[in-house]
Amino acid sequence: MQDFFTKWGEAANTSAGFFWMALWAFILGYVISSCIQIFITEKRMQRTMGKDESKSLLLGTFFGFISSSCSFSALASTKSLFKKGASFPSAIAFLLASTNLVIELGIIIAIFLGWQFVVGEYIGGILLILISWMLIRIINPKKLIKNARKRLDENGDEDEHSEKTWKKKLKSETSWAKVSKQYAMEWKMVWKDVTLGFTIAGIVAAFVPDSFFQTLFINTGNGNTNFGFFTILEHIIVGPIAAFLTFIGSMGNIPLAALLFGKGVSFAGVMAFIFSDLVVFPVLRINAKYYGWKMSLFILFLLFTALIGTSLLLHYGFNLFNLIPDPSAVKITNTDHFKIDYTFWLNMAFLVVSGFLIYLGFYKRKDVKHMKEMAPKSQLLETSLKYIAFVCYLWLAGGLVVKYFL
């Protein structure tokens, strides 16, 4: 029993420490994302993308890069762009870029995994887009695309609203109040995933023995980094399965990815785990609701195939240039997270920024309304996640009491 309480305290402290490490990055990322989404509207993107496929593919990638990292927001924006006339490859490029190339995700990865994984994330995001584009060109699913557009057209058009120029918006207090509302919405979209992801990461770090990972991911442990092709392939396939079972978005998955790498999972397997937020069941169900099950399954095949190819290319490419990081360099469990250092001061500064935005949008300018279309979530899943998140808070509070007061 004493051993359980010791591990409980370690698990809660690790989870809280992980979140403290990442707090300023979350705030910075969501402030940037909120500003971009208010000042560069979806309607402007639709007008700019045009009909030329090569141009629209590049613009789809760019607009995805500057968009929100939330999968549900990305799915809704992708549907809207595709419905308004963007080509299917450019819509897929937007979807992949908005979940893999975004700024806030890169910052979180840098904190937990290091610069090599950040480079891998951004190069991998581009490779995912290129491989998906090539597969679409080869398979040429014209009938699926036509039926998907027809299905969307039957659901009616979104309302059109007039928009100011971005220069006028920058000077408008109303626009900044909308930034505040969008910022709150970003947190509302991810708080359950982040809570669950960071709690699970702490529990895994404290309670799950290395032997479990050595069984799940073959040939891990003992400092082994020289993996054969079929071992790497197994890691790449098991990585998305592990992500599928957690039901956690990409931002909440990063501490788990760091733990996997520290436990000896290959670079390719960890990258596949990070890339897999679009091949989980909730995304499959939402795409089926938008485009029909045939198109949804095709998108799943497309993204999973691209994920395998990208992870293999990254592993062997990084290995060729000796860029694969040493797993022993990722030390995030036995760390004093709460000391007065640069993380503390960054958190303080960005908490002030967060407080100002909340004051502006929810006290000074209550009259400003802002709504953004989101993909339809499963009410049962969302309710379940909410109550699981509350249980996580009780677990964390209890564990911190055990560690510091008992």
Image (tube, helix red, strand yellow):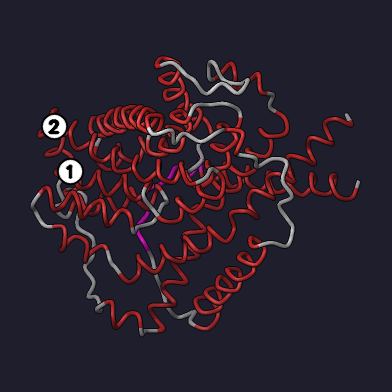
Considering the image in quadrants, where does the N terminus appear?
A: top right
Q: Residues within 10 Å of mark 2 (few under 14, many from 20)?
A: some
User: Which element type, helix, strand or loop, lies under badge 1?
Assistant: helix
Residue 242 x %, y %: 51, 28
Residue at 44% x, 46% y is 118
Specify the amino acid type for callout 2: Pro
Looking at the image, is 303 positioned above or below residue 401? above
Is 375 part of what is drawn in magenta? yes
Tell me the tag on residue 88: 1
Could you tell whether 401 is left or right of 275 in the image?
Answer: right
Tell me the tag on residue 141: 2
Residue 304 x %, y %: 33, 29
Of pointers 2 and 1, the one earlier in the residue sequence: 1
Specify the amino acid type for callout 1: Phe
Residue at 41% x, 52% y is 69
Considering the image in quadrants, where does the C terminus appear?
A: top right
Question: Is most of the magenta stretch helix, strand or loop?
Answer: loop
Specify the segment rendered in magenta: 372-381
